[in-house]
């Protein structure tokens, strides 16, 4: 099991082009299942959607390709991703 504090130390990098997205600041967790829905990253200088605070980027858990020792590789993120409740 990985702790949030351990994930926060890893840098988020887009696998396609090497863009550095910053670090994880929080997680979005489904209260019914306890599963992680999205990671919330610190996005410096980026505007996000209506429900996100300035400087926050929501990345769906499915966009994570690999979690390594020092970095987390994610698929290209075009913009903030919001989840819908089923």
Image (cartoon, rainbow, N blue to C red):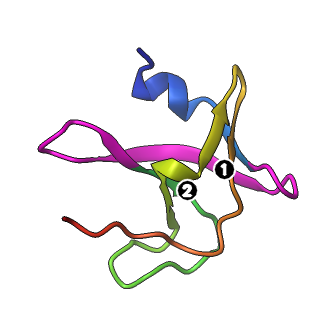
Report the residue marked by disc 2.
42
Where, by quadrant of the figure, is residue 76 drawn? bottom right
Residue most toward the left?
32
Please provide percent x and percent y for residue 66.
Answer: 66, 34
Please provide percent x and percent y for residue 82.
Answer: 39, 70
In the rendered structure, which segment of residues is drawn in magenta? 14-37
Task: Judge whether residue 20 is colored magenta.
Answer: yes
State the SS at label 2.
strand
Report the residue marked by disc 1.
22
Please provide percent x and percent y for residue 60.
Answer: 47, 56
Depth check: 2 or 52 in front? 2
Q: Which residue is located at x 50 percent, y 78 percent? A: 48
Tell me, yes or no, whether the two marked residues, 2 and 1, touch with CB atoms within 8 Å: yes
Task: Judge whether residue 27 is colored magenta.
Answer: yes
Q: Which residue is located at x 21 percent, y 36 percent? A: 34
Left-right relation of 17 to 23 = right
Using the image, determine if residue 72 lies above or below residue 4.
below
């Amino acid at each position: 099991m990985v702790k949030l504090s351990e994930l926060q130390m890893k840098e988020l990098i887009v696998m396609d082009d090497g863009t550095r997205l910053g670090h994880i600041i929080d997680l979005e967790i489904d209260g019914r299942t306890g599963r992680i829905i999205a990671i919330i990253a610190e996005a410096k200088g980026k505007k996000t959607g209506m429900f996100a605070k300035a400087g926050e980027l929501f990345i769906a858990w499915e966009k994570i390709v690999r979690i390594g020792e020092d970095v987390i590789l994610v698929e290209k993120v075009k913009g903030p991703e919001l989840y819908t409740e089923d």
